[in-house]
Amino acid sequence: MSDLLSRMRGIEDADVAGKRVLMRADLNVPMKDGNVTDTTRLDRVVPAIRSLSERGAKVIILTHFGRPGGKKVPEMTLEPVAAKLAQQLGKPVRFIADCIGPVAEAGIAALKDGDIAMLENLRFYAGETGNDPEFTAQLAKNGDIYVSDAFSTSHRAHASTEGLAHLLPAYAGPLMMAEITALATALDNPKRPVAAIVGGAKVSSKITVLVNLTKKVDVLIIGGGMANTFMYAKGQAVGKSLCEPDYADTAKEIMATAKAEGCRIMIPEDVVVADEFKPNAKNAVYAADNVPEDGMILDAGPVSVETVEAELENCKTLIWNGPLGAFEMEPFGAATFAVAKKAAELTRAGKLITVGGGGDTVAALNIAGVSEDFTYISTAGGAFLEWMEGKELPGVMALAQG
Ligand code: AMP
């Protein structure tokens, strides 16, 4: 993967003047009653669209919205998204009421150099998610150049995320480039020592992530509910805590692989134990091998936090997915927030490269107030996790030449 970037072409290298540029973005934005409620995804693509338009391209935006299941579902039209994008851009965005066929062809034929248009929801056709060659060819016929700026959909081999790259000259947009650069820096070719923090609820949902990381990182810091399963596997009592006894053998295998690979695994030495799974539940700190029978581990303890912080002082790269505790409930976010702040401080000081991602992780880092300080935060949930699992992402591989 590390030579991937050198095999990808950025859109700034393309001669786009007068060309029809089909640009795949991820504008699957949150909507309520037909209004866009969060413009983050729109704002992130604005610079690339503006630049292409200023360079004389006819910019044609392709995206999906929701899961219409291959049928035209009027409530899932992209018309309001196009209107909102026009507002954010401060330029008109022509909405074209179909993504293939005569309506799309006529709408695109009418575009002048520098114009911006958005095609209707790609998923109104089953050929999109089916990566159907006939559907892909119909999309391709309306473009001269393909740009993918939708890393978050690149773990899916769909017509607009993968198929098109084989039919048109294919380029990566700036968001795609930034994401791959950050992930390659953290995982494929990192400055060492490199640490990973993997937290969250369950071992079962992150087995492949854990196994892949043992082969790539020097220290694997395990937290959250999944650490309980590791404690249980080591013969420690975990009381009423979230735990997956069926995965104790998996946890043991992961510990054995780590040992063979020279990766140190760290699990909490002390834990915050509550009476019940509730905000502000009565709680106390216990040594990890002394958890009471009726207690529930909801966070890592202060000694564990200190150990992790000291570890980070010695590292040059950190990749983070998953909280260290039940951070949504006071006061069980303490360990997550403290470690996040330490990582942010080391990043600001230029000592640590920090890459975080995944839905809950982004939320936790936002609450800790460190999002701006991290080197990179990926909002691409599924694609980010698949990258951490070491999988090849079809939408990324299709952009790589040779
Ligand atoms: P995931 O989606 O796997 O990253 O899991 C995130 C969820 O794990 C969050 O909602 C946390 O509240 C939850 N979590 C973290 N630590 C614990 C714990 N010790 N017990 C129960 N839930 C936890």
Image: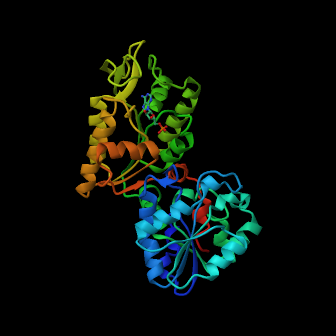
Find residue 62 and report its image quarter: bottom right
Q: Position of residue 213 (x, y in %)?
A: 49, 46
Residue 87 visible in the displayed image: yes
Q: Position of residue 333 (x, y in %)?
A: 33, 34
Quadrant for the C terminus in the image: bottom right
The image shows residue 178, relative to residue 252, as above or below, that is: below
Q: Identify the residue at image location x=56%, y=43%.
A: 208
The image shows residue 264, relative to residue 319, as above or below, that is: above
Horizontal side, residue 106 vs residue 378: left or right: right
Q: Position of residue 365 (x, y in %)?
A: 35, 45
Horizontal side, residue 194 vs residue 133: left or right: left
The image shows residue 129, relative to residue 235, as above or below, that is: below
Q: Identify the residue at image location x=49%, y=44%.
A: 214
Outermost residue, right side: 134
Front one among 194 and 25 = 25
Ligand number 1: quarter of image: top left
